[in-house]
Image (cartoon, rainbow, N blue to C red):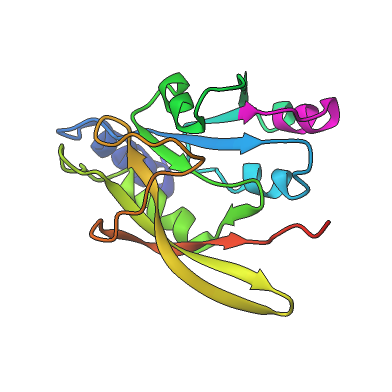
Amino acid sequence: MSAVLAGRRLFLHLINQRPFPMPKISGLIHISNNDRNLGRALESLRPCDEVLVVNHGAGEEILKLVREHGARIINGVNGVEHGAYVQDARYDWIFCIMPDEAVAEELEASLLEWKHSEPAKDQLGYNVAIREQNGTHWKFLAPELRLANRQKINWTGDRPPLAPDAPSLAGHILRIPGHE
């Protein structure tokens, strides 16, 4: 047996011997019919164990793209607050992203590392820095709570409310606003 194979087997054995279960993440995106960067957003959710897309009127072409990325589609209901759809997720930790955003590589690594941790039972969630494209420049925006524990916080909009005292994950979300 090669040293690499032996090392991989040892690594897998150690992961399975963890004293606590690995937390799982549900990615959540709300879409409509004008989400030009949606494919990029879906592809960037690799650290998520499931991706849940709430459809608020997207056409069949967009829904086909969602299915190609293996996401689960839930049809939005008029009058239901967007935050209520977290109850349709399989896992308690919800990572919220907008269709015009993508997880940058450093944040992806942070999320994968976080999944090997044991979050505190009372942890509300984690802030993430946002970088928004502004013409040819990038503008740094205030961090937002994007990885939220649905057992500890409720929200009504597409994203959880601000929680300035929550810890931050390394990395950032890239926001590339669509231009009509």
Look at the image and say whether residue 166 sits in the magenta stretch. no
Q: Split into 4 quadrants, where in the image is the N terminus? A: top left
Residue 178 visible somewhere in the drawing: yes
Look at the image and say whether residue 62 sits in the magenta stretch. yes
Residue at the bottom extreme, as displayed: 137
Residue stretch in magenta? 54-66
Residue 120: where, in percent of width, then height?
16, 43
Image point 67% across, 36% down: which residue? 31
Instruction: Relative to 2, say whether 58 is above or below.
Output: above
Residue 11: where, in percent of width, then height?
31, 42
- Quadrant of res 95: top left
Residue 98: where, in percent of width, then height?
59, 47
Image point 78% across, 48% down: which residue? 36
Residue at the front extreme, as displayed: 79
Image point 74% across, 76% down: which residue? 135
Image point 76% across, 30% down: which residue? 58
Instruction: Relative to 69, say whether 4 is above or below.
Output: below
Q: Nearer the viewer, residue 177 or 123?
A: 177
Q: Which of 19 and 57 is in front in this view?
A: 57
